[in-house]
Amino acid sequence: MVEYKWLALSNTTVATLMAAIDTNIVLISLPTIGRELPGTSATLLLWVLLGYSLVTAVVLLNFGRLSDMFGRVRLYVLGFALFTVGSLLCGLSQNGAELVGFRLLQALGAGFLFANSAAIITDAFPPNERGRALGINQVSIVAGAVAGLVIGGIISATIGWRWIFFVNVPIGIVATIRARTDLRELALPEARQSIDWAGNLLLAGGLAVILLGITLGALGQVALGVEFFSLLGGAGLILGFLAVESRVRHPMLDLTLFRIREFAASSLSMWLTALSRGAFTFVLVFYLQGPPRFLDPFSAGLFLIPTSASLAFFGPLSGWLSDHYGPRPFLIVGLIAAGAGFLWLTQIGSEDSFAQLAPPLLLVGGGMGLFAAPNRAAMMNAVPRDRRGVASGVGTTLINAGTTVSLGVTLTIMSGILPRSAIVAILTGGTGRPAVVGVAKNFLSSIHWIFLISGLLTLAALVPTLMRGASRRWTDPP
């Protein structure tokens, strides 16, 4: 009979893999969707991608707290069901506005999956095995994101773009049923607590306003003054959220968690690396498919194999080794390797071969693989069982918010170097090369700047990593 811990790991890994694949399977298919789905403007097409990241970033912490109150498995199963229904509706969309709306429903389901996966795994595995288990789960997120590029290219070119959503439906149905029957609550829900509605609304509003301001401003959809006031207003809402959380009896976010040095350091390191790598695949996809290379989606996906392969190898390995030798050496080596890879990518040219691109991509993937699992395990081990839903939500919120902000910063850099008309043509696939081929040199220059900033942010994450205290592990009751 299969041990419960392996049932928990297999189900949660399928969930994170599906949700991660779905992000980039859509990214690689955007040009096809734009050509074939009626009523799909460039703005709607971009928000098919950005809306998904925005919603998951906003809801994750809320869902982690709600899961501590009402049961992680219960809301995890609900998330799988929502994700599956959202996938079906996306495939049935008749216009761009419907697709954006159904993607938001998908994102709500993904929020429940991401918010609870790490907590369910942490509950199921003993402290000395959590690094390996979380390593496998974390690898599924990044490897799935890269695999989505190849899968999406194949599906869009053969059976049609709607099947990038339909393929989720049978898998989701089976996985939802198995989650309902196989998973069990190992942490008692805190049923007597009340819902922190003020905290939920202030945090969701603050993050939404900030991220909308960044992304819309970068795309030229709003004036600079509107973008500035949205950032200011969002920051004010988040400050209000922190004030509420420090006073309410049952806060959504337990701020006392950040008094744990290991948790605070892991959180800051995670945020910085999310900012650095959030737009990594996004940039490479359009470097390979945009001017002057114009590779087809399948060929572009093959160029990204070194990243996923090195991450898939080093992720579980570093998780397993950190269980035995502690996380610090793997965190340091991983950040240095990934930072070096990003800085190497500032030298890429317009016609670099696979052999020329593979070494820096291996460094980035391997470095992030070395870092991710030990850092997440240290973060989860540092908190007691009844706060792991919140801790898991914090971690994944930082990743998703960092990714969304990273996309916004990337578009801002591009908009400072390229005409916005060229940006729209590049990001939406354009219908012909003449619209973008003339800006190839400036486009490559913007990519160099993006990777330089990514490298510096990755190396900056060494500061909290070196300042973290001794690793702490809560001993769970049998």
Image: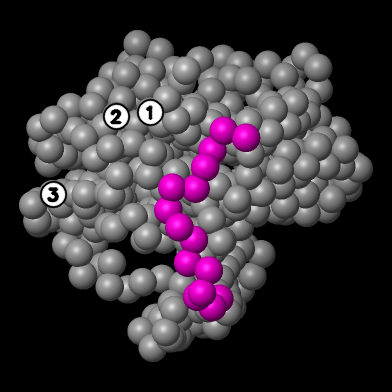
Q: Element type at marker 3?
A: loop
Numbered circle sitting on residue 471 = 3
Tell me, yes or no, whether the two marked residues, 2 and 1, touch with CB atoms within 8 Å: yes
Tell me the crowding category of disc 3: few under 14, some 14 to 19, or many 20 or more residues within 10 angstroms, Cα based: some
Residue at position x 8%, y 52% from top?
A: 470
Q: Is residue 343 magenta?
A: no
Question: Which numbered disc, 2 or 3, marks the residue that appears first in the sequence?
Answer: 2
Residue at position x 78%, y 42% from top?
A: 85
Residue holding disc 1 = 136
Tell me, yes or no, whether the two marked residues, 2 and 3, touch with CB atoms within 8 Å: no
Residue at position x 37%, y 60% from top?
A: 386
Which contiguous range is marked in magenta? Answer: 181-195
Q: CA distance from mark 2 to mark 3?
A: 16 Å
Specify whether 199 is left or right of 173: left
Specify whether 310 is left or right of 404: left
Residue holding disc 2 = 132
